[in-house]
Image (cartoon, rainbow, N blue to C red):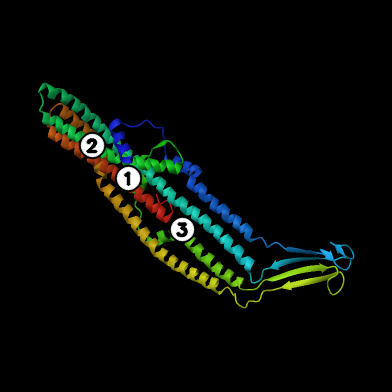
């Protein structure tokens, strides 16, 4: 269905949709305000804060009351007066072994983990936003070039059709122009299809129904061409300090260490302290007592949960070691992709900066004056279109690989 819509879009012309021209800064500002993924993830932080509040609360005291239902000596129901019987008691559970302290620390650590997970989601979505933004921009530049050529070829086809009907031009020349036109249309369709998907991503990320028309200045692109020497140690230090997912790995180990302490503390019996008053059924009237209770740790010493917590702790340490190696690989790969893309663009930059448009207009004018043949003209048009698209693709790769490097280190190097 998506391909069919794109095909109709190419054949029937662009559908009139609400559009607005925006800079990357405008997009990111709207993204931070409106993105539903971020808004939903924010609730995880609020929920973790609520659990921290709950962890700080002690168990409620337990109040008991014992009231006489029937006094057989006096043949009286509910005899709870001065000569009757009633008893009251109150008990409070007192945690020992640092249970409450470790429970609070674990809840606070989980709260910090939720914040780091939110920041990592923000990092991931920000990269998606920038990739879609720049992809739409450079695809739009390619489409502008192709559309300009299609307009010229369409005018030529109309003129050649009249001349073919008059017998002044052979039909094969018209067919060649029509074939070139269809080739450009097919190439255009591929770019349009990609832009439809990227526009959908932008709308989802921005929570907007409008199409976005990105605007990128020359200065914004040129910053990705600066020379940055490869320093794995420096990049890794930046990533360790800045990447939320790496910090989350460290925080996960901390949480598991606290959990081990908490599970050990749960093996320590707690004391129940209380007081009660008994009007008549005790050793003497109006008896007031202090009560103490403690479970005997004979069978349940929480060994299974302690062992489980230790196992999870060791697992998190191994995962952290693996992430260290993965981080080095990601940094090296991201830098190599960006540096290769930058070098490829710099190599062709002198050609790009020459008056390419003037050459195109000159060829078109000479063809219209019949100074060059149709074969030479169509060959040039195909080469020019491919070169223009490839230049935009090179620019796009430079920017996208640069943004991947930024995201890998979680620091704006450009």
Query: What percent of the width, then of the height, locates residue 63?
Result: 75, 63
Q: Is 156 placed left or right of 36 in the picture?
A: left
Q: State the separation of the CA atoms marked 2 and 1.
A: 20 Å
- What residue is pinned by disc 1? 396
- The front one of 294 and 210 is 294
Q: Is residue 389 visible?
A: yes
Q: Which of marks 2 and 1 is nearer the N terminus?
A: 2
Q: Earlier in the sequence, mark 2 or mark 3?
A: 2
Q: Give the quarter of the image for residue 53.
A: bottom right
Q: Is mark 1 on a helix, strand or loop?
A: helix
Badge number at residue 231: none
- What residue is pinned by disc 2? 184
Badge number at residue 245: 3
Q: Is 309 placed left or right of 218 in the picture?
A: right
Q: What element carries label 3?
A: helix
Q: Is 409 placed left or right of 50 in the picture?
A: left
């Amino acid at each position: 269905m998506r391909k069919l819509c794109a095909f109709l879009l190419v054949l029937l012309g662009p559908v009139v949709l609400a559009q607005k021209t925006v800079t990357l800064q405008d997009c990111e500002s709207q993204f931070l305000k409106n993105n539903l993924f971020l808004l939903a993830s924010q609730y995880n932080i609020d929920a973790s804060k609520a659990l921290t509040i709950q962890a700080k609360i002690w168990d409620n005291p337990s109040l008991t009351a014992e009231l006489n239902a029937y006094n057989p000596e006096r043949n009286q129901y509910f005899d709870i007066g001065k000569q009757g019987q009633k008893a009251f008691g109150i008990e409070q559970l007192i945690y020992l072994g640092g249970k409450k302290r470790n429970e609070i620390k674990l809840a606070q650590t989980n709260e910090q983990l939720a914040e780091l997970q939110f920041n990592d989601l923000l990092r991931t979505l920000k990269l998606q936003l920038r990739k879609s933004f720049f992809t739409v921009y450079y695809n739009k530049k390619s489409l502008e070039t192709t559309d300009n050529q299609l307009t010229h070829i369409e005018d030529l086809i109309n003129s050649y059709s009249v001349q073919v009907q008059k017998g002044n031009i052979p039909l094969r020349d018209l067919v060649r122009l029509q074939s070139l036109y269809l080739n450009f249309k097919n190439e255009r369709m591929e770019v349009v299809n990609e832009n439809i998907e990227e526009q959908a991503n932008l709308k989802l990320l921005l929570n907007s129904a409008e199409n976005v028309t990105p605007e990128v200045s020359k200065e914004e692109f040129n910053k990705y061409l600066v020379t940055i020497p490869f320093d794995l140690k420096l990049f890794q230090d930046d990533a360790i300090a800045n990447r939320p997912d790496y910090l989350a790995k460290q925080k996960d180990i901390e949480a598991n260490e606290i959990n081990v302490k908490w599970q050990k503390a749960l093996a320590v019996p707690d004391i129940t302290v209380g007081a009660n008053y008994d009007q008549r059924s005790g050793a003497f009237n109006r008896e007031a007592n202090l009560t103490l209770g403690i479970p005997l740790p004979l069978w349940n010493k929480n060994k299974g949960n302690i062992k489980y917590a230790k196992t999870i702790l060791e697992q998190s340490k191994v995962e952290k070691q693996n992430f260290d190696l993965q981080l080095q690989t990601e940094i090296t790969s991201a830098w190599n992709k960006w540096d290769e893309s930058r070098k490829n663009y710099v190599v062709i930059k002198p050609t790009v900066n020459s008056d390419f448009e003037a050459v195109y207009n000159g060829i078109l004018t000479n063809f219209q004056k019949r100074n060059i043949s149709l074969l030479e003209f169509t060959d040039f048009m195909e080469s020019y279109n491919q070169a223009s698209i490839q230049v935009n693709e090179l620019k796009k790769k430079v920017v996208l690989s640069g943004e991947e490097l930024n995201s890998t280190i979680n620091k704006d190097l450009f």
